[in-house]
Amino acid sequence: MRLSDGSQHRADIVVSAADGHGTIFDMLGGRYVDDKIKRRYSTWKMVRPTLIVTFGVAREFAGEPWLTITRLARPITIGHSGVEALSVRLFNYSPCFAPTGRRWCRR
């Protein structure tokens, strides 16, 4: 990766936090696009925007449901869409969601 100051950084793996189109077509300049990827971006329907906030906490949530949906008293407007509920999802149903050595990870 070459930054705007001209410095270059190399890595075996790079994780992008951008959307797929921005990563594939803008950042990578479309260099790794095949017919399957072109078809997805030209024919698949757009999905509603999603906001995901992730927290890593050093505790268990034993006995708690993995998904809780709370209806809002008033919808939140984001762009042209109204959000009527918030979901909280706990990833504690598999030890694979935590690195080895974390106390709740039972690998």
Image: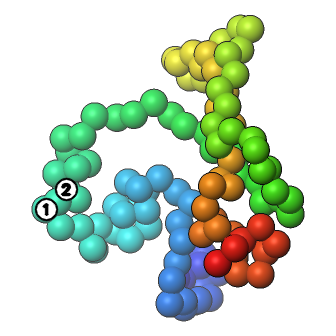
**Residue identified by numbered label 2:** 38
Q: Residues within 10 Å of mark 1 (few under 14, many from 20)?
A: few
Examine the rendered structure and indicate whether residue 65 appears above or below residue 48: below
48 or 42, nearer to the observer: 48
Q: Which amino acid does label 1 sit on?
A: Asp
Examine the rendered structure and indicate whether residue 50 appears above or below residue 70: below
Determine whether, in the image, residue 82 is placed left or right of residue 100.
left
**Residue identified by numbered label 1:** 35
In this view of the protein, can residue 77 be seen by the observer? Answer: no
Could you say whether the residue bearing mark 1 is in a helix, strand or loop?
A: helix
Determine whether, in the image, residue 26 is placed left or right of residue 80.
left
Which residue: 50% across, 90% down? 12
How far apart, in angstroms, are the residues tagged by discs 2 and 1? 5 Å
Examine the rendered structure and indicate whether residue 40 appears above or below residue 15: above
Which residue: 65% across, 43% down? 66
Q: Whole-percent x and y of residue 64?
A: 75, 41
What colour scheme does the image use? Answer: rainbow
**Count of picture labels:** 2
Residue 5 occupies quadrant: bottom right
Q: Are marks 2 and 1 in contact (CB under 8 Å)?
A: yes
